[in-house]
Image: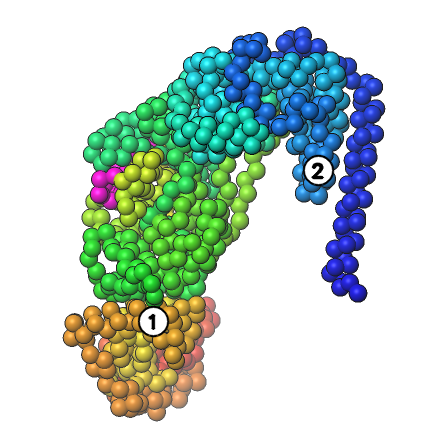
Amino acid sequence: MLSRARRKYVKNRKRAILLGCIVVGGFFLLGAITFLLVETPTIRTFESREVAESTKIYDSTGEVLLWEIHGEERRTLVPFDQISRHIKNASIAIEDASFYSHRGFSPTALFRVLFVNVFRGKPIGSGGSTITQQLVKNTLLSPKQTLTRKAKEIIIAIKLETAYSKDEILNLYLNQIPYGSNAYGVEAASETYFGKSSNELSLPEAAYLAALPKAPSYFSPYGNHRDDLEERKNLVLERMRDLNFINTQDLEAAKKEKVIFLPQKKHGIRAPHFAMYVRELLTKTYGEDLVERGGLKVITSLDATLQEKAEEIATRSGPDIESRFNASNLALIALDPKTGRILAMVGSRDYFDIAHDGNFNVTLAKRQPGSTFKPVVYATAFKKGYTHETIVFDLETNFAVSGTPYIPQNFDEKFRGPVTLREALAQSLNVPAVKTLYLAGVKDSIRTAEDFGISTLTDPNRYGLTLVLGGGEISLLELSSAYGVFANEGTRTDHHAIVEVRDHTGAILEEEKITSRQVLDQNIARTISSILSDNNARTPTFGARSPLYFEEGGVAVKTGTTNDYRDVWTIGYSPSVVIGAWAGNNNNTSMTKNVAGFIIAPLWREFMNAALTRTSREQFTPPESKTPQKPVLRGIWKGSRSYILDKSSGKLATEYTPLEQQEERVVQEVHSILHWVSKDNPTGPIPTNPEKDSQYWAWEGPVRSWALAQGLTDGISPSPTELGMDSSHLPMYWPQISFPSQEELGIRFKNNQRIEFHPIIRGTYAISEIDIFVDGEFIRSVKGTIGTLVLQNIKSGEHSLTLRVYDVVRNKSEKVIPFSVEDPGT
């Protein structure tokens, strides 16, 4: 008998097959009707089709034109026999292996695509196209993916197949399809990318061109997806080998051959990295055809003035950074943390500098972030109950409990002993950071990063404790955007570059949607900002007047350097702007051994100064101070078992001991923090068996050795049980306050009569001070005791007199009596 789950599966599968058959049957019915209505296009139709308006991309004001994606196509028609055999074979191999055998479309592919798309929620009309269908789709039909358009596409393809030979159709396809960079047809593409005619293309060059039509903007050799282009080119070659167009020897040789692309022409573009980024976003949403010829008007988030400043800084500073630090490239990004708008984006020293891979946009590339990831980890620790005053020991530690040792070093190869988390983060100390990651948890820290908008840390098991030192890979854009959570007091606002898109008629296709959500406790965000803007805390490492110091305050910043000096980062923010800067080499070679504070921080500081002039200057809200119970969480490192003494008696305080007479004493027991807390519940009770923690002995050994070297022996303070309980503050010893009976009951003073009281004050201990209040308002304080009390300038009416009496051990008593003063008119 089938189980319930199995019966449900069978039932759903039958429904899926039935629905698929209905969809396919409806499709063919629609196709039959369309077949009778659609005319067969002629060759002249392809050659004379109208080219629509160009798409224009503007800055945030809508007045500064960044880039006009011209509708005018660069195209040179060439006869079929003058096109390289390699590009013909490559196109067939990757796009339509059965091109010479089908009659315009593949029923099997169509059924598969329709069936899969229905149940995956994809557009019904997407995928499964033959070369003939692609020719129709790219030249004669709208890019909108609908069932009707798909039917027209197939019918026209079938009619084309009956009217023209396969070679004629392939020739039309190779002369019509877009290859990117406004190059339409294989001849224009060959000239654009390689400076040669299409009949001169080598095998690997042909494979590259055949790889482009699937997504010309995404796979562009001038964009940020060169690795993906390389993979697709190799896929083209492998398909050619599978179809016996080439042999294995040809395949391997073509894979290894280095192909040089010509430099990209400027085409009057401003903010090129940003404009290209926006184009790619548009293409994902609207398709290549509509973006290149649809006459779109696009308003972006870019601050053109700030962008110009960023480009000027990058161009001017790039050669100096390269000569001094062997860093051939750099990048800058600016965002508004409140709105998520990308204000500036510079992906390299110079977009058009081919010698330095200028067209590669480093702001989008995945790089190791070094210590700039640390604030995310510390925020995770604070979420668990650790505080900025929590103590960890900065000592040489082997964190590997087995296998290869993992012994991280600080940048200066020195160790500082006990440090607070505030000091550790501000000074970017590595050993405390690894300990903080262990306390926070790798998975929980990655979860925090994901909440902050970081999408690339997908495998927690890959990183381990190296994550906090930049073991993962993150883009400058995503990490800078993540810092916006701190700037925005725990609120995450998704970054975006497009504010508005209109079609050629002026109709709005897309409007800005600012999406925000609280992802971090407000006080934790404020604490991180407090640490990263604490110049005193960072001074031991960076100096008092470093580029990170802002005399007027209101700026928090963190630097990062990877262990092998392949990347240096500086990311900082005010409440109104986030600035991220990176320097390094695109090929991942190392720079000169130096820290980010010297290499990239001065450039970052100059750009931040410029950005602050264009935003309102705000200060960070200080975090609320909360005092945890455990000493180790409050900055006390000599132990975490404490008791309260009475200052006057030296004995254990009681419930009657005044607060100002209490003094905390900690029994000296120098241990690592794992001795005092359960890492996932730091505010809970002291663990009874702390050694069960896998890292306990790795941390405890260095701490105990350090304490011994410092001459710190456990248990120097007297045992609390030996002290006894304080008795000097028991109620029986409190000061006694009384008045003569007539004053106790409430005396009535006549107008202009001297207002005089005669308190009687006694105490076991000498009276030290008396505070006097009338109607709850403090009047004055008297040292010692008094026998006569005279009040002056008391208005007529009902009143109260309060005496608050303290003795020398700060016992306190209070007495309130009523009195009145007659109105002068009575």
Viewer can see residue 331 = yes
**Three-letter amino acid code at disc 2?**
Arg
Q: CA distance from mark 1 to mark 2?
A: 57 Å
Q: Is residue 429 above or below residue 117?
A: below
The chief SS type of the magenta part is helix
Q: Does residue 293 appear to the left or right of 608 in the view shown?
A: right
In the rendered structure, which segment of residues is drawn in magenta? Answer: 591-610
Q: How is the image coloured?
A: rainbow
Q: In the rendered view of the protein, which quadrant contains the N terminus?
A: bottom right
| SS for callout 2 | helix
Residue at (30% x, 66% y) in the render: 391
**Residue in view at x 76 percent, y 52 percent:** 12
Q: Residue 745 occupies which quadrant of the picture?
A: bottom left
Q: Position of residue 213 (x, y in %)?
A: 56, 25
| Residue occupied by mark 1 | 696
Point out the tag, 1 or 2, that comes first from the N-terminus.
Answer: 2
- Point out residue 479 in the picture as x, y percentages from the top left corner: 41, 44
Q: Is residue 605 visible?
A: no
Residue 280 percent coordinates (x, y): 51, 29
Q: Give the SS element for disc 1.
A: helix
Q: Are marks 1 and 2 in contact (CB under 8 Å)?
A: no
**Hey, what amino acid is under mark 1?**
Tyr
Q: Quadrant of residue 588?
A: top left
Q: Mark number for residue 112?
A: 2
Question: Left of 543 or right of it: where is 243?
Answer: right
